[in-house]
Amino acid sequence: AQSVTQLDSQVPVFEEAPVELRCNYSSSVSVYLFWYVQYPNQGLQLLLKYLSGSTLVESINGFEAEFNKSQTSFHLRKPSVHISDTAEYFCAVSGLRKNYKLSFGAGTTVTVRA
Amino acid sequence: DVKVTQSSRYLVKRTGEKVFLECVQDMDHENMFWYRQDPGLGLRLIYFSYDVKMKEKGDIPEGYSVSREKKERFSLILESASTNQTSMYLCASSPQALYGYTFGSGTRLTVV
């Protein structure tokens, strides 16, 4: 089984400042890793994912995450945030087999202030 | 784009009522899931299904059941609603692990 720990429940940040959201996972097998974003009053949307290959993955709106196998981490970063990045962010992990399920962290609420 | 539709956005039910939450996906995905989302607890898996008429318990199945009679539809049933089942319920579907999930918009259920 897999599990996820998101180390920060709330992250306040000023507009145009950088932000890092920390995620650690636990698994005895190889995994896929995901970050989802939930804007207020909406469902979850896939932000980015790591499947294999390059350990640095990027999203279309400037976020990036780095897979670190030795530290079992998948931290999410953005060098300069906007007000519109205010949302809740969830890290998730799954095994590779066909019949699978995602395990989610508790979420990190990012509040961007002007 | 894949669409996952949950029948109700907001729902208010009385304690003891039988409640049905419906979820429909339009992309022929084999896998469907029901989660509940509570502040500080993230998403917790209630039930999931890998195929028609198949279901498996997730982490918190007590007080819930599910039905999957057709591939596109996955229903969550609260047999006798209780106040501690007040929550946001999220349905998701997926073809396989490497694609992640597509989520519906959620149903916010209040049991009074």
Image (cartoon, coloured by chain):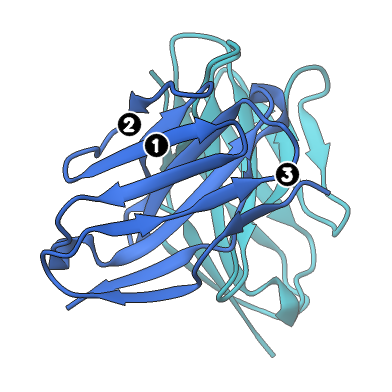
**Which amino acid type is marked by label 2?**
Gly
Q: Residue at x 70, y 71 (%)?
A: A85
Image location (x, y in percent) of residue A1: 38, 18
Residues under labels 1 and 3: Cα distance? 17 Å
In the picture of the structure, the residue carrying the numbered disc 1 is B67
Q: Position of residue A10 (x, y in %)?
A: 45, 67
Disc 3 marks a residue whose amino acid type is Asp
Q: Secondary structure at mark 2?
A: loop
Disc number lying in front (2 or 1):
1
Residue occupying image coordinates x 83% and y 23%: A54
Q: Colour of chain A?
A: cyan
Q: Label 3's element?
A: loop
Label 1: which secondary element: strand
Chain bearing tag 1 is B
User: Which disc, if any, is residue B58?
Assistant: 2
Q: Whole-Å distance between the Cαs marked 2 and 1?
A: 14 Å
Say which chain tag 2 marks. B
Chain at tag 3:
B
The one nearer the camera, B77 or A40, is B77
Of pointers 3 and 2, the one earlier in the residue sequence: 3
**Quadrant that contains the C terminus of chain B:** bottom left
- Callout in the foreground (3, 2): 3
Q: Colour of chain B?
A: blue
Image coordinates for residue B79, horizontal then vertical, percent: 19, 50
Reading the chain from its start, which is encountered first: label 1 or label 3? 3
Question: Which three-letter amino acid code belongs to the residue tagged 1?
Answer: Ser
Q: Say which residue label 3 marks.
A: B26
At label 3, counting other C-alpha atoms closer than 10 Å, the crowd grade (few under 14, some 14-19, many 20 or more) is some
**Up-down relation of residue A110 to residue A76 (above or below):** below
